[in-house]
Amino acid sequence: MSKFGCSCGHVISDVEAPNEVTGALISDKDEHAFFELLEATALDFLEHLKANNLAAWRAKHFNEIYPTDAVPAELLADAIYSRFLDHTRAVMECDACGRLYIERVHGSNRYRGDDPELDPTGDETPHVLGPVVSAKPPPASRE
């Protein structure tokens, strides 16, 4: 996807990546499954690396169009990211009104909206995606 029309009339665009208007949502159950797969994937990778047989690992985890010149770190990162995507739903946030759109079914590219005006907390923070802001102040510099 590259553009999505919000019900407020604004167009959400994820043409630029990374961005602060798209993200991923993972359930507790999927998070648990993802970390189990992460462990199994990493252990399998290390076994193949130790045996000097990354070609077999590549064939096991990717199709034939995957680059054969990818370095080991890229192989592992791509496999982990693929498993992460398998366990998440896409989320978009309108940068005008703060409305969240959550993918209805993983991979469906169909979304349901959430109205920020229905927030019973009265939180004035209009957006949930974007830079993570720590509640703790940054450490003092040692100049």
Image (cartoon, rainbow, N blue to C red):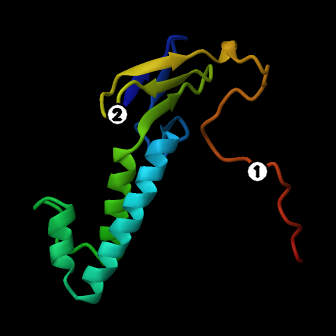
For the N terminus, which image quadrant?
Answer: top left
Residue 92 in the image, given as x and y percentages of width and height: 49, 30
**Quadrant assignment, res 140:** bottom right
Q: Residue at x 15, y 75 (%)?
A: 56
For the image shown, how many numbered marks are present on the structure? 2
Of the numbered discs in the image, which one, if any, rests on residue 106? 2
For the C terminus, which image quadrant?
Answer: bottom right
Q: Is residue 73 left or right of residue 137?
A: left
Q: Residue furthest left?
A: 64
- Amino acid type assigned to the residue bearing label 1 in the image: Ser
Q: Residue at x 39, y 24 (%)?
A: 104
Residue 134 in the image, given as x and y percentages of width and height: 76, 50
Of the numbered discs in the image, which one, if any, rests on residue 134? 1
Residue 69 in the image, given as x and y percentages of width and height: 20, 75
- Amino acid type assigned to the residue bearing label 2 in the image: His
CB within 8 Å, label 2 to label 1: no
Residue 53 in the image, given as x and y percentages of width and height: 19, 83
> Is 73 above or below relative to 65?
below
Q: Give the foreground label among 2 and 1.
A: 2
**Quadrant assignment, res 96:** top right
Q: Residue at x 50, y 17 (%)?
A: 113
